[in-house]
Image: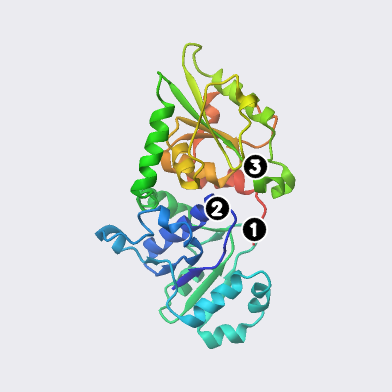
Amino acid sequence: MVILTQDLDGFGNHLLLTSHFLVNAVQHNYELAIPSFERYAPYFEGPTGKPTAFFGRLPVRLHTDQLATELLYRGLRSRWGGGALLRLPWLHRLLGVRVVVDLPSGDVDLNSPAYLAQARDPHLHLLVHGWQYRDKINFTRHSDLLRRFFRPIAAHREAVARVLATNREGGVDVLVGVHIRRGDYAGWHGGAFLYSNATYVRAMRETQALFPAEARVRFLLFSNEPIVDEDFAEFDTGRSTDHPVEDLYAMAGCDYIVGPLSTYSMWASFYGRVPLCHLHRPDQPIRTLGEFVVFEDQETVRWEATMPSVV
C-alpha cells in the first residue's frame, strides 16, 4: 500500500497531486491511501465511496488499515515530528514501512521500476512525502476517469448549474472566468503573483478586445478575498457562491479562464477543457486567443519550473 502523507496548502494542489497517484495506482494495480484528502472527499462522488461498480473497483481508500502506520503518518505530517521520524530508519523497519521523500530539484516519475516495485510489495507500507511526484502519461491516459472520480456531488453540481445559468442570462456570448488569487499569494514565491486589481482590469480589457465589438462578454470573478466591485465597474461581471468546490467547477464551466499561476485554475481548465491564459507576470499582455490553452498535464513543464518546492 502507498500512503500519501503530504498535506499541501491549496485545494488545487491536493487535486493535482492526488490525481497523479490515483492514475498510477489504477494503471499499475496497487492500493493507495489518501488520508490527506479526507477533508475534500465529501465534495466528490468518487472518494465518498458511492456504491457504484466503477468506483468500487478502484484500489483507493481514505484511511490506512494499521494503527502503527496511522501514527507514523500523523507524525510525518506534524510540524516537528516529520524531520525526527525521517531520521529513524530502525522504526520504519520495525513497523514494516518505508518512507520516501521527493527531491526539490525535479519531478519524480511514478512509473520508475524502483518506485513500482515498492508500491506493489504486499508486505510493505510505503509512505510518500512530497509534492513533485508525477505520472504525466497516465494522467492523460486516464483523464476521463479523473473527471468521473472528481465529479462533485449532486448538491454542488446543482449550485454550479445555477451560477452558470444566471451568468449566461441576457444574451451573454462569452463567459470568461477571472481568478483573482490573493491570501496565501502574499508570501508565495515572494509575492510575485500577488497582482493588483489594476493588473486584472488590464487583462480583462485585453481579453474583451479579442472578441467582436457586438459580442456580449461577461466576466465571472472568483477570489479568496472580498472583491471590490468599484474596481471592475467598467465590465459586465458576475459572481459565484464563494464555496471552494462550487467556484472551482463554475470556473470549469466558463468559455475562457485568465489568472495568475495556480493549480486551482489549472484544474478548472483540465476538468472543463476550458482554454486558460496564465499571467506569468503582472505586465504580461494578452494579444490573441491562441494564448489561451486547455491544461493537460504534459504541459506542467511550463509552470512547475517557476514553483517552489513545498516539501
Q: Residue furthest left?
A: 53
**Residue 290 appears at what percent x and percent y?**
52, 27
**Residue 265 appears at what percent x and percent y?**
53, 41
Q: Bin the neighbour count of mark 1 within 10 Å (Cα to Cα): few under 14, some 14-19, many 20 and up.
A: few
Which dot, 1 or 3, sits closer to the camera? 3
Q: CA distance from mark 1 to mark 3?
A: 18 Å
Mark 1 or mark 2: whose residue is earlier in sequence: 2
Residue 13, numbered circle: 2
One can see residue 94 in this view: yes
- Horizontally, residue 54 falls left or right of residue 250, namely left
For the point 39% across and 69% down, the residue is: 30
Per the image, the residue denoted by label 3 is 182
One can see residue 306 in this view: no
Residue 145 or 259: which is nearer the viewer? 259
Location of residue 277 by image quarter: top right
Per the image, the residue denoted by label 1 is 310
Q: Quadrant of the C terminus?
A: bottom right
Q: Amino acid at mark 1?
A: Val
